[in-house]
Amino acid sequence: MKTTTRVAIIGGGVVGASVLYHLTKLGWSDVMLLERSELTSGSTWHAAGGFHTLNGDTNMAALQGYTIRLYKELEEITGMSCGLHHVGGVTLADNQDRFDMLLAERAKHRFMGLETEIVSPEEIKKIAPVTNIDGIVGGLYDPLDGHLDPSGTTHAYAKAARMGGATIHTHTMVVETNQRPDGTWDVVTDKGTIHAEHVVNAGGLWAREVGAMAGIYFPLHPMEHQYLVTEDVPMIVDMMTDGQEHPHVMDPAGESYLRQEGRGLCIGFYEQTCRPWAIDGTPWSFGQDLLQDDFDKIEDSINFAYKRFPDLEKAGVKNVIHGPFTFAPDGNPLVGPIPGVRNYWSACGVMAGFSQGGGVGLMLAQWMVEGECERDVMAMDVARFGDWISPGYTLPKVIENYQKRFSVSYPNEELPAARPNRTTPMYDVFSRMGAVWGQQFGLEVVNYFATGDEPTFETPSFRRSDAFDATAREVAGVRSAVGINEVHNFGKYLIKGAGARAWLDRIMAGRIPQLGRLSLTPMLSEKGKLIGDFTVSCLSEEEFQLTASYGAQAFHMRWFLQHQDDSVSIENITDKRNGFQIAGPRARDVLAACTLSDISDMKFMDVRKITIGMTDCIVQRVSYTGDLGYEMYCDPMGQRALWNTLWAEGQKHDMVPFGMRAMMSLRLDKFFGSWMAEFSPDYTAAETGMDRFISFKKNTAFIGRAAAEAERDAGAARQLVSFEVDATDADVQGYEPIWLDGDVVGFCTSGGYSHHAGKSIAFGFLPTDRVAEGLAVEIEILGHMRAARVVTTPLFDADGARMRG
Ligand SMILES: Cc1cc2nc3c(=O)[nH]c(=O)nc-3n(C[C@H](O)[C@H](O)[C@H](O)COP(=O)(O)OP(=O)(O)OC[C@H]3O[C@@H](n4cnc5c(N)ncnc54)[C@H](O)[C@@H]3O)c2cc1C
């Protein structure tokens, strides 16, 4: 066995094998896979082998499409069979909400190039005759759906990787991973130690145990899962005689997936009465084993399935497969470099290895070989969870995710498990004031305050929700007087040291402000992709406070630490500095009355240290509401005192507390983009208009400069624009197609209802050469074409007089 390698992948399931193959595909041949038993010895060997493209996240769906198309390539390269059955599949909808979700998915598929199709109940009966269509509203047909041979496919990946120079050692158990001071790893196995530059954890069912060898907690948990294979089903036998194969049928109402297996059927369930497995850790003694059959657990699901697929009941059960596989808290994979740990990569938490394994392998290989992925992978980035995550949070979230696997996911839905988790000193105060809470990166965030007979629970919906009136009231309160909410859900960082300014100049593309001032700046990757939009405030020549998206904390800290040098200290102070923002025409009056400092000369984008009441604060004159506003940051120990001061004074100025629903409406008035909607690593600064904050004048080789300059010279092919939409009861949420002259020419990034202007607003990309004020387009919302027009003049304070005045 070789004792050195560039990459040691731990785990020979479908995911490890895919990563190995993709590394060779991108040119790294000195790569090695270590498997403690035979290949496929975790969840992989007993998988049902189904694959599909449907995923709530657009990038995940695209990667699932890539995975499915890859199998043919693998077969061609290796001459091996993956046992492919491209039989297509239909997802059923038995009510309007489920159908709305399918309509929204179909619309997204239009610009993704996926040929899915909305089908009627009658068409479903023709396509998938085992289905009883009673109560079915419609369905979504995807010709790409199908199934394969899990073992054959894993071995095909392995062979393709070997052909590219990789080595695979089976019956080689990794027992330790020890990092050397230079960041490389000693991977200790029962056959000897391998010195590897990089380690990839693809340990599947044992990913937690493999991670623990390096002191890393991986937020995932195995769940038990069961599927049945029947004896011959006469209808299937007849179809086979006619040379046909029955397609897959996903029945979300019954939480089941069904397909043909041989001359019978195979059906699996995501039952509500589900059970986590191996809570205290996966035993090393578990191998190519199955769990005891458990029909009691799936009794309700089976009974439902007998009604939806009556032929099932007529066939005896031939085989039961009951095995464990792992989930992350949100059901998406955990991929990428571990924040704060050099050269350690994650490829685990993959709950649908045959839909996602190829995409996971490709993205991880791009990340390792090329330094970044071709697309935004936040949905599966291991950094989407922070260091606040714990097994106590992961377990209930994983159970919730399993139970909701086939549920409708609403854009405004707040999932209840593992909450409240992280709260600020305001939690009880705001709860008493009627706060209706949401959750962001583990943190409780007020969505809106319910007063009078406003609903204390926001009903999940694809349409305008029942929080509409409360949101309108809060927006009016901000625009007419003054609103207050917390600044807890900003990510905050402190950059200190003699080299702070120079370091920031290199990391950020924009201008770094002078003492007492703020600036807005994009942060770019080497390839010029947007990886952050920051507010930088200069507190002293050697101390800068940065604010950005709360949910991107681990993502941003990982980047900062990767680029840290000895001249700066970098601290994530997100939860150490808290406070409020006040916004609206009377915000200045409130602040002035609460402090002895003279703030009359405090200009837009100024930052100052001010004592408010008893509390020392850093005050920034800026507001995401687009109004006259101030953000006040303090030690959380002083936050309640700060609240008492501001709220007592606020009463004299008709102050209203407001939540995120109002905030997201207010930002529409000024066409302010939002992180992970308008601004994400899928887009560049020039495409989104963020290039206006790039300082090409500064004499620094900031990261991404070459790419940004090239784009400045060539011009961006597409451009982010704002639309007024003739919507009825549903506004744009994101990824709706934009039609022009009968063709899909772009897609939306986000949208909503501007309560201030009384208009439905959307943001989206159009080809640059088509952009023109007033251009009439159509936006497809929930299957309906809505007329929309390009607008360039903000709906509120167009000349900035209020914000800057
Ligand atoms: C009943 C059931 C049905 C399923 N059906 C489907 C389906 O239809 N479609 C689909 O896409 N997915 C399905 N899945 C999920 C699918 O099986 C998983 O997504 C996939 O197998 C995960 O692969 P993996 O490589 O991440 O992990 P695993 O398959 O668990 O592989 C991990 C490997 O790492 C090895 N390993 C661990 N620790 C060490 C160590 N210390 N040293 C060396 N080697 C180590 C293990 O031996 C194992 O071989 C199903 C799962 C179950 C349980």
Image (tube, rainbow, N blue to C red):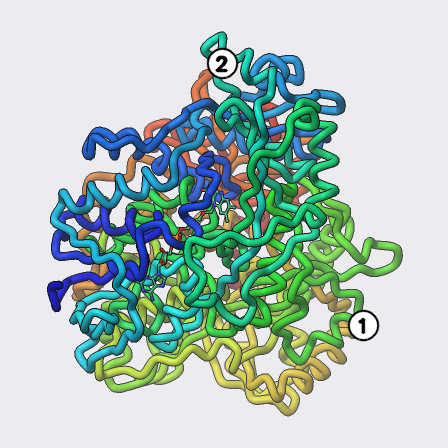
Instruction: Tell me the CA gap for discs 1 and 2.
Output: 64 Å
User: Which mark is in front, 1 or 2?
Assistant: 2
Q: Which residue is mark 1?
A: 432
Q: Identify which amino acid the numbered label 2 is placed on.
A: Met
Is 780 located above or below residue 576 in the figure?
Answer: above
Q: Position of residue 253 (x, y in %)?
A: 69, 36
- Residue 114 percent coordinates (x, y): 42, 27
Residue 186, by quadrant, is bottom left
Q: Is residue 569 visible?
A: yes
The residue closer to the viewer here, 48 or 695, is: 48
Query: x, y percentage for residue 755?
Result: 68, 46
In the picture as drawn, the residue positioned furthest to the right comes out as 453
Name the residue: 47% across, 50% down.
351
Q: Residue at x 49, y 14 (%)?
A: 240
Q: Say if 580 sits above or below 27 in the image.
A: below
Q: From where the camera sits, is residue 561 visible? A: no
Q: Nearer the viewer, residue 612 or 137?
A: 137
Q: Amino acid at mark 1?
A: Arg
Whichever of callouts 1 and 2 sits on the residue coming sooner in the sequence is 2
Report the side of 325 relative to 445 (left or right). left
Rendered position, 415 above or below 686: below
SS label for mark 1: helix
Mark 2 lies on residue:
240
